Structure formats: structure tokens, C-alpha cells
């Protein structure tokens, strides 16, 4: 199973469609916040369509993991939270947006966050910290996203389709 990891979509329908095109039939999407950006969104911009993303995600029959970001209004897509812990590939994963520094569970092995729009992949002691960056509004480089499978995690460059960073899990 492959996990496609993203954050900071900010209601961009083009980014959403790009991410869907990157996914295989059995892939799982992990979204580290600011999916919809219904708080400060670019209302009136032709690429801003959080309603279409919400309808698409609600109709999807695939597993996904999502947490709210600082630009998401929880009532727009209820039933989620600002943090989420789940197991995948025999690892305990802690997912949050990163705008509220909080306590990371001591048994979390992979910590995924967004918020900065800057990709990050590093190991500290026995933990992996990952920020997939952003496809919609990347900072410090081009558009990026993350991939995780049973062997490794990596940050992918959207334009070239090649890893910019990778490590074994």
C-alpha cells in the first residue's frame, strides 16, 4: 500500500485533481491540513473550489486521513480534528497541521505536519519528521508532496516526478 501525503491545498481544484491523478487504485491520501481554506480563501478565483473538493472527497470510496489546518473551518467538513494518530505499515503515525505546537505522542514513530509550505524530511533519534511542502503555494522551491510505503518515505518533486529526499523506515 502506498500513502500519498499532502498539505496546504488551500481549496485549489487544480491541485486536488493533480493529487487524484497521482494516486493508484489502492493508494491512501494523507492530508495535513488546509485542504479547503474556507477561512481566508481566494473567493472568486477560478481555481478556488472547496465545495467541489468536499463533494469529491465525500463521495470517495477510498480511505483517507485528514486533519484541520488554521485555514479550515471545521463546520465545512465536520467529523475530523486538529490531530490524528493512526497505524500504517506497522508504524504509529501522528498527523497534525503544525500551527498549534502541541504534544507529540511519545510512541509516535512518524510525525507528519504541514503549515509552512516548505518540505522537510529528517530523522531525530528514532522518529521521522515529514512536511510534504505544498503543490498549491510552495515556498523555497517547487511543488512537492510525500510518498510512504512499507520500506521508505520520500518527498517528491511534482514537476520532475523524482525524489528530492528519501529515507528508509
Image (cartoon, rainbow, N blue to C red):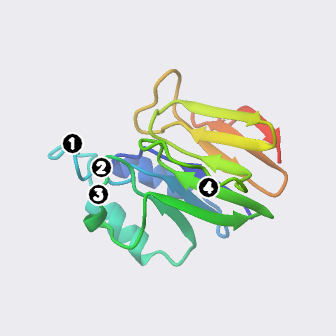
Task: Please identify, in this view, whether the residue under mark 2 or under mark 3 is nearer the observer.
Answer: 2
> Residue 94 bears which disc, if any?
4
Q: Residue at (74%, 45%) from the top-left corner?
A: 153
Q: Residue at (81%, 64%) from the top-left corner?
A: 90
Left or right? Give the position of 123 relative to 68: right
Instruction: Using the image, determine if residue 55 lies above or below residue 147.
Output: below
> Residue 37 bears which disc, if any?
2
Instruction: Using the image, determine if residue 144 lies above or below residue 12.
Output: above
Q: Earlier in the sequence, mark 2 or mark 4?
A: 2
> Residue 42 bears which disc, if any?
1
Disc 2 and disc 3: Cα gap in Å?
Answer: 7 Å
Disc 2 and disc 4: Cα gap in Å?
Answer: 22 Å
Residue 22 visible somewhere in the drawing: no
Disc 1 and disc 2: Cα gap in Å?
Answer: 8 Å
Mark 3, secondary structure of its residue: helix
Q: Give percent across and percent down for residue 92.
A: 72, 60
Looking at the image, do the residues carrying marks 3 and 1 touch, with CB atoms under 8 Å apart? Answer: no
Task: Please identify, in this view, whether the residue under mark 1 or under mark 2 is nearer the observer.
Answer: 2
Q: Give percent across and percent down for residue 5.
A: 59, 51
Q: Nearer the viewer, residue 133 or 46?
A: 133
Left or right? Give the position of 40 relative to 74: left
Which of the 4 image quarters holds residue 119? top right
> Residue 50 bears which disc, if any?
3
Q: Earlier in the sequence, mark 4 or mark 1?
A: 1
Looking at the image, do the residues carrying marks 2 and 3 touch, with CB atoms under 8 Å apart? Answer: yes
Task: Please identify, in this view, whether the residue under mark 4 or under mark 1 is nearer the observer.
Answer: 4
Amino acid at each position: 500500500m502506498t500513502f500519498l501525503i499532502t498539505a496546504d491545498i488551500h481549496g485549489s481544484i487544480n491541485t486536488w485533481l493533480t493529487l487524484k491523478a497521482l494516486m493508484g487504485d489502492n493508494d491512501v491520501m494523507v492530508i495535513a491540513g488546509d485542504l479547503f481554506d474556507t477561512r481566508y480563501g481566494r473567493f472568486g478565483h477560478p481555481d478556488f473550489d472547496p465545495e467541489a473538493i468536499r463533494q469529491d472527497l465525500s463521495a470517495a470510496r477510498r480511505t483517507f486521513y485528514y486533519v484541520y489546518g488554521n485555514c479550515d473551518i471545521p463546520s465545512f467538513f465536520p467529523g475530523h480534528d486538529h490531530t490524528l494518530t493512526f497505524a500504517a505499515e506497522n508504524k504509529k503515525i501522528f498527523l497534525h497541521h503544525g500551527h498549534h505546537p502541541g504534544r507529540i505522542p511519545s510512541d509516535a514513530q512518524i510525525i507528519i505536519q504541514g503549515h509552512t509550505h516548505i518540505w522537510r524530511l529528517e530523522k531525530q533519534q528514532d522518529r521521522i519528521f515529514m512536511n510534504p511542502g505544498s503543490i498549491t503555494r510552495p515556498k523555497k522551491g517547487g511543488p512537492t508532496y510525500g510518498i510512504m510505503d512499507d520500506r521508505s518515505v520520500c518527498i517528491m518533486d511534482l514537476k520532475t516526478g523524482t525524489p528530492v529526499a528519501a529515507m528508509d523506515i
